[in-house]
């Protein structure tokens, strides 16, 4: 089975564990990859739509992994009553991810692997409020779009991050890999092009200044 670079990047953030929950599994490509590569022993492949879950179930059967991957129709984690060690939620906006993680019966000891496709700063603020520490991050590009992958674990203390770290990611800022630099430069170029026609130049100039400081820091 051919797995996208995006899914491989997500898989690289997942520790070897007994049980993982993959929320929004779609075709179950990630669960199949995780089991076939001995990263996870068992996966609950969750989707809230019947059509995608049927596709997932078919792919799981064709891979001969019925005993290791359990498809489950559920609105997020609500129908799950089993123990798990990690949760993956990818390909959704931060608001949706926050809703999924806001259930009362969430196992807070589970490691979170999250790929928000919108407003990652909102998700980081949520993690801080729930006493999670961001232990690793990746910055990826998929079909001309840039996304962070956030790995978080429950902390005994409140972990604090400054505004820049919340906006761009504390570990992404430390790593400053080429994709992140490419992303920031594109943002700067786009804002500078808009600056010529902008009525309120001060706001754009402030944003440009902030982005340039990110590259320098």
Image: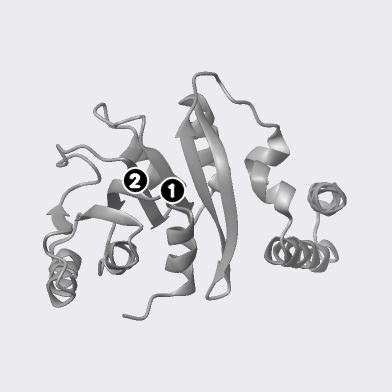
* Element type at mark 2: strand
Q: Is residue 143 left or right of residue 203?
A: left
- Residue 25 sits in quarter: bottom left
The vertical placement of 190 against 159, above or below, is below
Circle 1 Cα neighbour tier, 10 Å, few/some/many (<14 / 14–19 / ≥20): many
The vertical placement of 145 against 130, above or below, is below
Q: Nearer the viewer, residue 188 or 38?
A: 38
Q: Is residue 39 left or right of residue 204?
A: left
Q: Is residue 46 left or right of residue 13?
A: left
Circle 2 Cα neighbour tier, 10 Å, few/some/many (<14 / 14–19 / ≥20): many
Image point (34%, 43%), residue name:
86
Rendered image: mark on residue 34: none
Q: Are circles 1 and 2 on residues that touch, CB within 8 Å?
A: yes
**Which residue matches tag 2?**
87
Q: Position of residue 45 (x, y in %)?
A: 22, 56
* Element type at mark 1: strand
- Quarter holding the N terminus is bottom left
Marks 1 and 2 sit apart, C-alpha to C-alpha, by: 6 Å
Image point (41%, 42%), residue name:
112
Q: Position of residue 93 (x, y in %)?
A: 43, 52
Q: Position of residue 48 (x, y in %)?
A: 20, 54
The single residue placed furthest to the top in the displayed view is 157
Q: Nearer the viewer, residue 175 or 122?
A: 175
Q: What's the colour scheme?
A: one colour
Rendered image: mark on residue 113: 1
Q: Position of residue 109 (x, y in %)?
A: 36, 30
Image point (85%, 46%), residue name:
217
The single residue placed furthest to the bottom in the displayed view is 2
Q: Is residue 23 left or right of residue 124?
A: left
Q: Earlier in the sequence, mark 1 or mark 2?
A: 2
């Amino acid at each position: 089975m051919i797995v996208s670079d995006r899914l491989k990047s997500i898989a690289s953030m997942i520790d070897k564990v007994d049980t993982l929950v993959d929320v929004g599994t779609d075709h179950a490509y990630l669960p199949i990859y995780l089991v076939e590569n001995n990263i996870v022993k068992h996966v609950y492949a969750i989707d809230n739509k019947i059509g995608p879950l049927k596709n997932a179930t078919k792919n799981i059967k064709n891979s001969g992994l019925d005993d290791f991957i359990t498809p489950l129709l559920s609105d997020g984690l609500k129908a799950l009553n089993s123990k798990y060690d990690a949760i993956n939620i990818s390909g959704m906006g931060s608001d949706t991810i926050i809703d999924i993680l806001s259930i009362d019966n969430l196992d807070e000891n589970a490691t979170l692997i999250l790929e928000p496709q919108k407003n990652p700063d909102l998700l980081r603020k949520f993690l801080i409020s729930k006493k999670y520490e961001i232990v690793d991050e990746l910055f990826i590009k998929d079909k001309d779009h840039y996304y962070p992958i956030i790995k978080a674990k429950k902390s005994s203390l409140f972990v604090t991050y400054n505004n820049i770290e919340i906006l761009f990611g504390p570990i992404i800022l430390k790593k400053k890999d080429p994709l992140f630099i490419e992303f920031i430069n594109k943002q700067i170029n786009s804002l500078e092009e808009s600056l010529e026609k902008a009525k309120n130049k001060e706001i754009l100039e402030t944003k440009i200044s902030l982005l340039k400081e990110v590259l320098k820091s």
